[in-house]
Image (cartoon, rainbow, N blue to C red):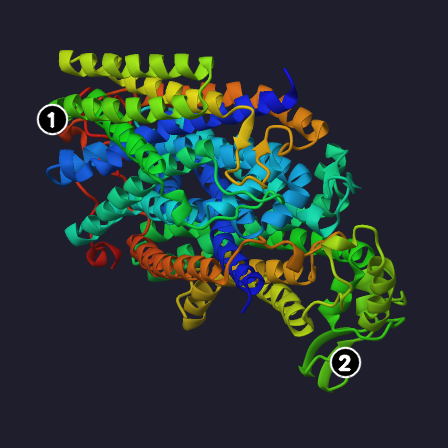
């Protein structure tokens, strides 16, 4: 492999890995803040037990999200220096602002939340978790603005003298139409993921609980969590639908690739499942929903959807002879079709399966029921993973579907890589990071399972009130 | 002042914030086996930085992000050029950050021992390499006419660079010892203070040698003043440690590190990454900068939010101002759960 391919593998591995922890952080911080506020309002100790229980799991997850996030910021410069040069004027600003607004807020107030049980008044303590959540939202907004610019560059001009994209309208970058629909889509998916995490764990405990008291702790977590999954899923579907239409407009090739649609069709059918090589010629078996793709892409059941072959010609005309052509080579302009096709379906399929299970859980636990069958166990184990992996496939789809571009229409990935990057350096970095990430995954999962098994323990006898000089800390590492 | 200069100053401020704050985190981490004689003492040490280390590390992330936005060429050349040192720093920061959170999650001495090692090594590597990196930035590295780094890993290991690395290492060790002396009570506090006295001496010797060398290479009047005051602050830290005035002593290393970094940036200006190649092109605040439009937006954001960040970070230190002693450390959480969960 050449350095570009290795760098791409590193970006894919580190980003997908990092984004396993991000949606849980976003979703769970909101849910924990909700628990703590409910506790303050009702003074019902169950909510405090849930706060503390899921708080511990949150921290195990958050820590690994933080440290893998540092890699994300560094590797743009390390592996993708030509990209950084080309886009820094536009792309750097949201990244820097993310650090200043979001990272400081999250890290500082999380420190206060973890160690502040006996140092802060209860309302202020709960407010810290709210601020952590606000920090995660800021973070999501700015990093998605940067990503949306790569999908649909706006608010810039190409400067032939400096050979780079230069920002001329920051508001356009922040309120990019792709961003305005991507942000809700990603954040709602994160709520779905965080809530599915909670439902899975609480349901597992609910099924094992032997006393009515224990059941009374986990039941509200299951019910509220499942409702959050369902409502968030609805929002994910609606925002995803709008996203599809915008994508058809600004990145038609990505939509065609998502469908494996080679020839332009009106009306276009939606392929649910297809066997074959996905090269447009060897389709062996497929299930199609008539006209659905037209509806998803254009909003009307008979609308015309451009196919890959036509788009390839159009892209060649548009991008083949452009003054900024130093940054891309006239090529195929087609992403890897099987990957985009299947990641798109896995994203939707896993997400919908998660929502369906949440709906079933709501039904199965209706009016005080606490079912204990094997199906409940299966649901509890499957649920946390479904929206989580749907997130991963969503990113794999949206990033692979943009290829060969790094910045759509402006710069290809092969021109983005650091010119001085040697194969040896690239391999060293890829192997070292992958090995460390692999070990950490094992450690993290085992630790999570240990603490999940403990459950929402009884409160310690002296819950934080007056802090005498020599009392032990309410929390210590 | 031109916006490019404003951003040079702001990036200096971010690095000053990073080194003065995470500097003592690194020192505490490296001193874990020296000052912490048993698990409880080590937990005392870790808990002095527990609530703040992550916030301190964000200064690095913002310095990196701000460099990306304000000086894209600098970010690109620096990060791709210093590839292997940065990779080592990344790996160190990954295991170290996780160690703080995960160490206490199992009451098992082998588990804790491994994470202690991660904290020690994860604090040592960046302490050394940041000095090496900054010395290389000051002295210049091979950068070709396309503003690309043209050297290898071993170009970065000159005697001057190694002296820079030892200097940051010694300064952070001292800073950490004084922080422990300031934030703990009992036996460990005295141990830390006693250790700090010779550490200040070593750090002062190394720092004076490194800063004088820097001054002789690229110094300006401004950097000379900063370096001299930094050296005086170190002397003050030594006197404070000897007299048992931990607060003043810690302030001494705080000021010394801050001014040393400020002096390095003053010695660097207006370059940001000079070249050692005759036919190469060095990076300056002008040719590495983003456009005036981007800098203006960034300036407004920084002016509004930096004071806010300083206020709430400062408040955190106030909330956790109490000294910690061994009797404050609660017993470790139970290792196994089988009984409770059934």
In this rendering, the answer to whether B34 lies above or below A64 is above
Q: In the image, B239: left or right of A344?
A: left
Q: Position of residue A226 (x, y in %)?
A: 53, 54
Vertical placement of residue A346 versus A238, above or below: below
Protein chain holding label 2: A
Viewer-proximal residue, A429 or B272?
B272
Helix, strand or loop at mark 2: loop
Which quadrant is the C terminus of chain B positioned in? Answer: bottom left
Whole-percent x, y for residue A64 in the image = 40, 49
Q: Are marks 2 and 1 on the same chain?
A: no
For residue B191, the mark is 1
Residue denoted by label 2: A280
Alpha-carbon span between mark 2 and mark 1: 74 Å
- A454 vs B124, nearest the viewer: B124
| Subunit that carries the residue with mark 1 | B
Left or right: B266 with respect to B74?
A: left
In this picture, is B192 found above or below B240? below
Quarter of the figure with the N terminus of chain B: top right
Q: Nearer the viewer, mark 2 or mark 1?
A: 1
Query: In the image, residue A446 lies at what x, y percent?
Result: 31, 59
- Quadrant of res B26: top left
Residue A241 in percent (x, y) is at 74, 56
């Amino acid at each position: 492999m050449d350095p570009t391919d290795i760098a791409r593998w590193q970006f894919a591995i580190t980003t997908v890995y990092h984004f396993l922890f991000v949606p849980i952080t976003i979703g769970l911080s909101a849910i924990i803040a909700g628990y703590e506020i409910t506790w303050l309002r009702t003074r019902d100790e169950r909510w405090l037990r849930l706060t503390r229980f899921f708080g511990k799991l949150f921290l195990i997850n958050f820590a690994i999200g933080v440290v893998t996030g540092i890699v994300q910021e560094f590797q743009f410069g390390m592996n993708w220096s030509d990209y950084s040069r080309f886009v820094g004027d536009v792309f750097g600003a949201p990244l820097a602002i993310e650090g200043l607004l979001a990272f400081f807020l999250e890290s500082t107030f999380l420190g206060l939340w973890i160690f502040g049980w006996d140092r802060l008044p209860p309302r202020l303590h709960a407010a810290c978790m709210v601020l952590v959540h606000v920090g995660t939202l800021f973070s999501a907004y700015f990093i998605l603005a940067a990503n949306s610019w790569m999908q649909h560059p706006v608010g810039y001009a190409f400067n032939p003298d400096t050979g780079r994209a230069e920002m001329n309208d920051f508001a356009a970058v922040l309120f990019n139409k792709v961003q305005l629909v991507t942000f809700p889509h990603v954040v709602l998916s994160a709520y779905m993921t965080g809530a599915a995490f909670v439902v899975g764990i609480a349901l597992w405990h609910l099924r094992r609980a032997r006393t009515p008291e224990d059941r009374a702790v986990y039941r509200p977590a299951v019910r509220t969590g499942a409702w959050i999954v369902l409502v968030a899923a609805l929002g994910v579907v609606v925002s995803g639908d709008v996203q599809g239409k915008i994508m058809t407009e600004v990145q038609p090739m990505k939509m065609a690739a998502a469908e494996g649609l080679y020839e332009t069709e009106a009306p276009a059918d939606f392929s649910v499942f297809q066997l074959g090589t996905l090269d447009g010629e060897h389709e062996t078996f497929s299930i199609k929903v008539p006209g659905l793709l037209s509806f998803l892409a254009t909003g009307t059941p008979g609308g015309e959807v451009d196919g890959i072959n036509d788009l390839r010609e159009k892209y060649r005309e548009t991008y083949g002879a452009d003054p900024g052509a130093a940054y891309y080579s006239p090529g195929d302009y087609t992403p890897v079709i099987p990957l985009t096709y299947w990641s798109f379906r896995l994203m939707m399929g896993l997400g919908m399966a998660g929502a369906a299970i949440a709906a079933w859980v709501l039904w199965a636990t209706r009016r005080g029921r606490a079912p204990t069958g094997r199906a409940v166990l299966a649901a509890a184990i499957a649920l946390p993973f479904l929206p989580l992996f749907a997130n991963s496939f969503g990113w794999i789809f949206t990033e692979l579907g943009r290829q060969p571009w790094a910045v759509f229409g402006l710069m290809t990935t092969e021109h983005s890589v650091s010119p001085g990057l040697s194969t040896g350096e690239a391999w060293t970095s890829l192997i070292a990071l992958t090995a460390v990430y692999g070990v950490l995954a094992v450690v993290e999962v085992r630790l999570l399972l240990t603490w999940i098994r403990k459950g929402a323990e009884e409160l310690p006898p002296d819950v934080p009130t007056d802090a005498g000089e020599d009392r032990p800390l309410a929390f210590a590492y | 002042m031109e916006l490019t200069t404003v951003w040079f100053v702001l990036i200096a401020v971010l690095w000053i914030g990073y080194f003065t704050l995470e500097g003592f985190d690194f020192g505490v981490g490296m001193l874990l086996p020296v000052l912490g004689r048993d698990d409880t003492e080590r937990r005392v040490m870790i808990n002095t930085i527990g609530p703040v280390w992550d916030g301190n590390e964000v200064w690095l992330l913002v310095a990196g992000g701000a460099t990306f936005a304000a000086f894209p060429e600098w970010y690109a050349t620096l990060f791709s050029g210093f590839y292997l040192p940065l990779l080592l720093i990344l790996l160190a920061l990954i295991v170290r950050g996780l160690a703080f959170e995960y160490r206490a999650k199992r009451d098992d001495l082998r588990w804790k021992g491994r994470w202690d090692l991660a904290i020690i090594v994860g604090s040592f590597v960046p302490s050394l390499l940041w000095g090496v990196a900054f010395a290389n930035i000051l002295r210049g590295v091979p950068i070709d006419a396309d503003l690309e780094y043209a050297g290898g890993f071993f170009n970065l290991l000159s005697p001057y660079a190694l002296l820079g690395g030892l200097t940051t290492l010694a300064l952070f060790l001292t800073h950490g010892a004084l922080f422990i002396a300031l934030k703990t009570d009992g036996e460990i506090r005295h141990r830390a203070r006693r250790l700090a006295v010779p550490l200040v001496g070593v750090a002062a010797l190394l720092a004076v040698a490194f800063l004088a060398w820097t001054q002789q290479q690229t110094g300006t009047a401004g950097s000379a003043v900063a370096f001299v005051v930094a050296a005086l602050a170190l002397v003050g830290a030594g006197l404070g440690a000897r007299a048992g005035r931990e607060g003043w002593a810690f302030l001494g290393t705080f000021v010394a590190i801050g001014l040393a970094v400020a002096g390095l940036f003053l010695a660097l200006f207006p370059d940001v990454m000079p070249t050692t190649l005759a036919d190469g092109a060095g990076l300056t605040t002008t040719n590495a900068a983003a456009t005036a439009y981007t800098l203006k937006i960034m300036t407004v954001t920084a002016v509004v939010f930096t004071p806010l960040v300083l206020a709430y970070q400062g408040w955190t230190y106030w909330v956790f101002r109490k000294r910690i002693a061994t009797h404050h450390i609660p017993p470790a959480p139970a290792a196994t759960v089988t009984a409770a969960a059934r």
